[in-house]
Image: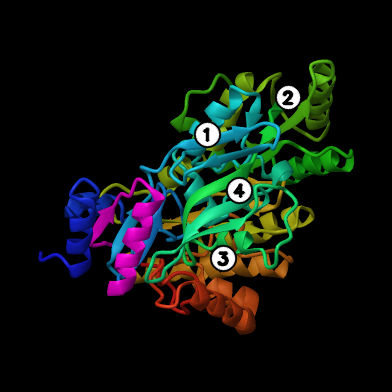
Amino acid sequence: MERSKTVKELLDELGEEKVIADRNVVGLYSREPDGLTAQAEAVVFPSTPQEVSRVVATCYANDTPIYPQGSSSSLSGNAVPLNGGIVLSLERMSSILDVSLVDSTTDVEPGVRIDDLNVELSKRGYMFPVDPASQAVATVGGSINNGAGGMRGAKYGTMKDWVNGLEVVLADEAGTRLELGCRTVKCREGYDLVRLIVGSEGTLAVVTRATLRIAPLPEKVVTALAFFDDIESLMKAYISIKSSRVQPYIAEFMDAPTVEMASQAVSLPFEAKGDMLLVSLESTPESSERHLRWLEDLMRSSGARGVYTAESEAEAEPLYQLRRSLFPAQVNMFRREGRPFQLFIEDIVVPPSRVPDAIRALRSLDSKYGITSSLGGHIGDGNLHPAIGFDPTDPESSKAAAQWFDDVVDVALRLGGAVSAEHGIGIIKREALRRAVGERQLGLMRAIKAAFDPRGILNPGKLFSDKKGYN
């Protein structure tokens, strides 16, 4: 296959080690874990901001689409290269540039993996609290683009709460490098352009450096993992915790069928059966025993028939392991040997007080469509991840999946929630976004996109199209 003008120019500028056009390699960078896939022309691996600038300027001159990418662990089609062009992989820009405990900040390149960042910060008694389920591979840049959340979201929020400043490259003829935001927490210098970039899914600029806020590690974390016979009892326990003026450090749940499948994927030192509630509380060495006893007693008085506890995060790792197996469990629930397969993992969010209503509404969709869905998520902030699998080559299967998907969106909007909490819009939620925000807001978003990216080369086809991208 003849190489395009853009790829030839990039090869001349960066060399064969940084511009890969082999279809097998490119294919690996053109897919997501949920089964969505496409094919770019090449993958480019810059190692400096200057090289990113050169790549963007070359693509701008040739009207070549650019798909910025961290580890491609997103689940909404955010990183899939729809229209050819190049994947811009930032994985080689993976340095931790600075850590300031006095300022409570760290400066990092976009390819730094969140787990690796936390390993370094933990040596100083600090952490970066945003912890997506894919944190072992998820990068800072990808998490910024996606507006990632995680299990600690109940207490610490999402990526938008932890980014002070950014260096970005703009899609213009010079590949202009621009400093946005500040190193400080308080910063009021006109419009907040940093918050526009966070969650923009790579459609506005390419992130080349980030100044992140960091937080001290808790002195102590106590954890209880409980199993209930029904969701109502589980919710009773969680409501009791919040009604006691306690803000969980982590609050997660999974329904019984998902627990059963997840428990088969990991080796657990306890019996996992029933609807699962996982709660961690920040504590102190002096108070940890009292807090843990209170949490266990509350779980049991709410109807838990099995409660397992841990007095530290290290001891709690087997308890967290079950919840972290949610995605592979959902894959295993729906994959059929020898058949095409795509996973729909929804990402709706509702006010935590409406979680019981949302669960009941989602459960009713199983009987409506004659399916068994999987359900889990972050109960502490109302972020639910129902999932189903379908055959994308079967029109009837695809149609039923699309109808289920629309009904899940209806549940979120009806209960005062949002269509996406942390996975983003990407391909699969473009129509859901239109329904949620309306044409006037979409018009403002398109105008912002045009101001940042006048030729529309950054991650084209995401966010704004009215065409559903299920295949």
Q: Residues within 10 Å of mark 3 (few under 14, many from 20)?
A: few
Instruction: Say whether disc 1 or disc 4 marks the residue closer to the N-terminus.
Output: 1
At a point 46% along the width and 47% down the height, the residue shown is: 110
Dot 4 lies on which element?
loop
- The kind of residue tagged 3 is Lys
Question: Label 3 to label 4, Cα distance in Å?
Answer: 31 Å
Q: Is residue 57 left or right of residue 443?
A: left
Dot 3 lies on which element?
helix
Instruction: Say whether disc 2 or disc 3 marks the residue closer to the N-terminus.
Output: 2
Q: Which residue has dot 2 on it?
A: 222
Q: Is residue 87 left or right of residue 415?
A: left
Residue 170 appears in the rendering? yes
At a point 76% along the width and 41% down the height, the residue shown is: 233
Give how far across and how far down residue 133 sits, in percent.
53, 41
Question: Label 1 to label 4, Cα distance in Å?
Answer: 16 Å
- The kind of residue tagged 1 is Leu
Give the magenta part as a residue range. 36-63
Instruction: Indicate whether 6 appears above or below 256.
Output: below
Question: Label 2 to label 1, Cα distance in Å?
Answer: 23 Å
Question: Foreground mark, 4 or 2?
Answer: 4
Q: Is residue 180 magenta?
A: no
Question: Label 4 to label 2, Cα distance in Å?
Answer: 21 Å
Instruction: Say whether disc 1 or disc 3 marks the residue closer to the N-terminus.
Output: 1
Question: Foreground mark, 2 or 3?
Answer: 2
Q: Is residue 56 magenta?
A: yes
Dot 2 lies on which element?
strand
Q: Residues within 10 Å of mark 1 (few under 14, many from 20)?
A: some
Instruction: Say whether disc 2 or disc 1 marks the residue closer to the N-terminus.
Output: 1
Label drawn at residue 149: 4
Q: Which residue has dot 3 on it?
A: 368
Q: Which residue has dot 1 on it?
A: 117
